[in-house]
Each structure stands twice: as structure tokens, then as C-alpha cells.
Amino acid sequence: MSQLSRRRFLQTTAAAGLVAVPGAGAIACSPSTAGESADAGTGQVDDPLGIRGEFPVTEEFAYLNTASVGPLPVPVRDALAEYADQKMRRRASGSLGEAVNRARTKFASLFGADENEIAFLYATSGAENIIVNAIDWQPGDNVVIDELHFVTTFVLYRELERRAGVEPRIVRATGGAVTAEDFAARTDHRTRLLSVAWVSNRNGFRHDLPKLAELAHSRGAFLYADAIQAWGQFPVNLHDEGVDFACGNGYKWLHADFGCAPFYVRREHLDWMAADRFGHRQVAESLPDHRFRLKTDAEKLEYANPAYGPTTALAAALDFIESVGTQRIAGHTHSLAADLRGRAEALGMDLFTPPDNPSAIVSFYHGLDPEVLGAALNAEGVQFSFQEDGRLLRAAIAMFNNRADVDRLLGVVRALV
């Protein structure tokens, strides 16, 4: 991000009461910033989106682990610091509600939803629990999920099976992918819900939500997407996706913090969608004799005070993502992920991520001693994730990553094969 554009960004967020504008000396982002590698032939800094200087993590690591936790960019850190200062000194307490409203407005605008379709939960898993508790399940009903989903979903539906006699049907993956046709083979007139990880945490496989939505609705079922690996990774218009519900926390690809999980509920479901707990935040109007009229939009799912710090971070993070552009982020990260996949395959790695997959996550079975490989990668400052007892290596390409980061990962692998 150029000096001028960053100053404009910080001034905008500061005007909204989120960050303090630093002095000019703190704004400049020179090509000599630590962590920004230069191409030996041209001397040009390898920073395709111009934002590596906003992510201090790049000064120390080849950080390829955003699928686990996304690092904070400087503007989000500044927003959190300003929030902490205001709370410490008890100044401008009225800005807390403004930050929540601004985050809701910004999220709806950026992700193709209406503001009254967005609730802020504390965790992604809260959304699927709300959905499950709101559906009137009958013994013999079924829910269809796939094996690329996150573990929380399996825990939830095994408990639903035990408690209500609902059958969880698990669709197997082929070549690291699951298609709408695979789901269709497991659905019937007793299917009430299809649940997917929009982008799998295991291998980055990205579902085609419109096709799944068409299938679910043709069966009279709903479609839920766990979006924690999707929010911020690529352009999204939730209305166009056809999904009924989607939720994901802010601490991964949104580069915000734990504790604020935007939950999308398509407008047509707000009438029957019931909260699973109750509290003062749901009150729209106080009536005589300690009675109340409760909210009817998605905010009716927010029963208590929001996590103001994480919500403040989310508002600043959404500003930052918008300034970079989700289309640019996707173009850069998906291209670099495809390059990583192809080069890993050329080294003889057994790819778990399918080809031509439009996401920024790549995983492969390395066939090496995990302790040796892990130690070598750590020694080179490469941050990554092991899965499946260390047999599977997962790398995640974020907006700040560059080819040099990928080179560091593959250089270690190449030296050991």
C-alpha cells in the first residue's frame, strides 16, 4: 500500500473513531522494509498487492498458516489499541455501538447481504447449533455432510443422532473433491439440511454453493455453509450463492480477531429462525408488567453484549480488505496457490488438494518424517500446519505472501526428498 493510500485509509478509519492517525514517519512503507524480498534480476520488491509492509509477520516468517490464524495487519492492530485506550480511560464509550453498526453495514455491503440478515456471534459453531435447534427434527430425518467438513460438525450431528434419531449421512471425497452429484446420491425426501465447509480446512476444496443450494431446495432442505475459510479469501455475494445460512469467524482470512463471527440468515428464514438463548440485547421494546417485544431481524440472535474489541477489529479489517480488493486478493493468492500445488506435485508429493481448485489452501502428503520436516521448516522460518498425525502438510497463501515464501517451503521439501 503506498504512503498516500495508507494515510487515506488510516484517516478514514480514524474519522470513524477506530484508530489514531500516526505521524508521517510511521506511515511510510519503503522498499527496504524487512521481510520484503527483492527479485535478484530486477531489484523489484516481490509484493504484488503492495501490502506486505502492513503485516509485520512477514519480517520474520514465511507465514503460510492463515488457514489456522490470520495475522493482524497494522491498521487492525491500531484499531484494537485505540479501543483499548478508550476503554482504559473510559472515553467515547458511545463509539462502541457505532463500531458494531459500522461492522454490520460494512460486512453486508462487502459480502452481498442485507444488514438485517447479519448477526454477530462469538464463534462459528454457534451458528450451526442455532440452526439445528431451530429445525423441527423428526426421527428418521437426515442431514447430509461430507468428510471434508470441520470436526465440530461431526460432533454436533452425532449428538443430534443420539438425541433425536436424525441420521447423519457422510459423503465421501474422491480425489480431494465432493460434487453436487455426490450429495444428490445421499439426499431424499427426509433430508432437512445440507451442511458443508464452503472451503475445506483440510485441503482447501471449494464447494459450488449455487449447485448445492439448487439441490437442497429441490428436496425441501436448507443449505448451511461454514464460511470461516471463505470470508475474505475471494469475492462473495451471498444472495447470488443461494445459501440459506453461512457463518465464519474473523480471525482467519478476514485478519481480525477471535470472538466475532458474522452469521448470515437469508431474509426469508428470519420469521421461523428462533434464538437458542435469550437476553437483554434482543429487546426491541419494553412493555408493561416486565414484558417485551423482541427483535425480528437477525439481531434477535444476539442475546448479550457483543465482543466489542473483536467487532472493532472486524470493522477495521473489513475497511482494509475493501481497500485492497477481494478480486485482487483472490487473483494473487489463488494463482500462487496453483503454482505451489504444481511445484509440489513435480517434487513427487501426493496432492490432497484437487487441481483447478479456486482457493488459497494447498495440502499434500509429503512422505517424509514429520519431525525432521517440521524441524527443517521451522529452522527456515516457515509457518505451516501439519494434519493427520503429521502426514499431511497444509499451506495457506494469504494476500501478503509472495513467491519467495513458497520457495522457502519447497526448498526445504526439495532438500529432504
Image: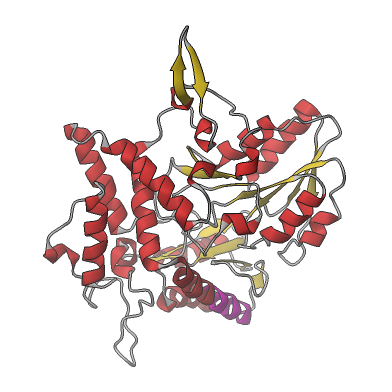
Residue 52: quarter of image? bottom left
Q: Residue at x 74, y 67 (%)?
A: 175
Q: Residue furthest bottom?
A: 41
Q: Is residue 296 above or below residue 77?
A: above
Q: Is residue 206 above or below residue 288?
A: below
- Residue 310 seen anywhere in this rendered image of the structure: no
Q: Residue at x 41, y 34 (%)?
A: 306
Residue span colored magenta:
337-347
Drawn side of residue 329 relative to residue 273, left or right: left
Where does the image place residue 401, in percent across and percent down from the top left? 41, 70
Drawn side of residue 106 relative to residue 2, left or right: right
Where does the image place residue 244, in percent across and percent down from the top left? 65, 47
User: Which quadrant of the rendered structure holds the C terminus?
Assistant: bottom right
Drawn side of residue 328 relative to residue 170, left or right: left
Q: Is residue 338 magenta?
A: yes
Q: Is residue 248 above or below residue 386?
A: above
Q: Is residue 137 magenta?
A: no
Where does the image place residue 70, in percent across and percent down from the top left? 43, 56
